[in-house]
Amino acid sequence: MSVSTSPAAAENTSPAWTESLGRAIDFIDDPRCPGFLIDAISALVDFDMAMSVVHSRRAKPLLLHETFKEHHARRGLSNYLHSTYVLNPVYTAHCNGIEQGVYRIGDLAPDAYLSSEHYRTFKVKRMVSEEIGYVTDSWPAGMEELVLAIELPDDKVGEISLSRTVSQGGFSDASIAILRSQITVIGAIFRQFWQHSEAGAQNSAPAPLVDDMLDRFGEDCLSPREREVVQLILKGHSGISISSHLGISQTTVKSHRQNLYTKLGIASQFELFSQFLQSLSPIDG
């Protein structure tokens, strides 16, 4: 595979970046490639921990590589991979059609994450100090997260997540600019690895779509409009955001919310998330 960088981008690179990038290319058919790619990225920006996964609407995230050192952090990663990914801004953005690029995770989060009660359902802790208003149970707190989203075939997206302690300064705009200058080559290597890897072939097997489960949630008792409102609530949108998305008044949103709660036999957003989680059980089986 041939890769190149522009002169402007080259100014932001180092011999360590070039050497590590070459190693990743040499191991393009090897399961170690994602790890070497993260090693290369560490030559561009500082971070404390990283993970590389592939998201699919047909399955839970597939972990390719991680650098989590602490036991509790690995437990948090397991919680994420098995359940909390459903509400994670990256997965939601993937379902909405995220473009390849570098993002602060807070920029991907819907506007109601700080007030949502979904953290109680999905083994997360509400923490206003966190960028998206919560932290997965056992996930290290006080971290700023950057996401490198990579377009993949078959409606999948690769994610390289970088986390750095906020007390150490988090990620500067300059660091983000450096990563953006190299996202094309990073994406090309990730994509070639995925297309040639055994993991990519195995993960292409059909499975129930979480998105389809969301579309079908409440179909036996809710009206089409009420189901649209439910989907936006589950994705973390506020009444104001739902009003804007659907082109209806906030009063109408409130009315739909009350009606759908009655039809579902629930009285709170917490119960709504609990009921939705139960509906996902066929996927877990």
Image: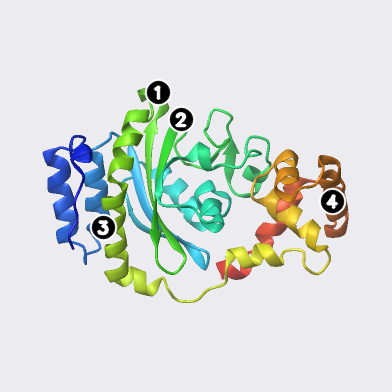
Pointer 4 with pointer 2, Cβ within 8 A: no
Query: In the displayed structure, does residue 243 sit left or right of residue 93?
Result: right
As drawn, 116 above or below 273: above
Q: Position of residue 214 (x, y in %)?
A: 66, 62
Q: Is the C terminus in the top left, top right, bottom left or bottom right quadrant? A: bottom right
Q: Position of residue 146 (x, y in %)?
A: 41, 40
Local SS, label 3: helix
**Which of pointers 3 and 2 lies earlier in the amino acid sequence?**
2
Please state which amino acid type lies under the numbered disc 3. Answer: Ile
Front in this rendered view, residue 169 or 122: 169
Residue drawn at 49 percent across, 53 percent down:
98
**Which of pointers 2 and 1 lies earlier in the amino acid sequence?**
2
Local SS, label 4: helix
Q: Which residue bears the numbered disc 2? A: 142
Please state which amino acid type lies under the numbered disc 2. Answer: Gly
Q: CA distance from mark 3 to mark 2?
A: 31 Å
Q: Which residue bears the numbered disc 1? A: 167
Q: Which residue bears the numbered disc 4? A: 256
Local SS, label 1: helix
Q: Which residue bears the numbered disc 3? A: 189
Pointer 2 with pointer 1, Cβ within 8 A: yes
Q: Mark 3 or mark 2: which is in front?
A: 3
Front in this rendered view, residue 283 or 209: 209
Residue drawn at 60 percent across, 49 percent down:
122
Pointer 4 with pointer 3, Cβ within 8 A: no
Label 4 packing within 10 angstroms: few (<14), some (14-19), many (20+): many
Query: In the displayed structure, does residue 186 sit left or right of residue 143?
Result: left
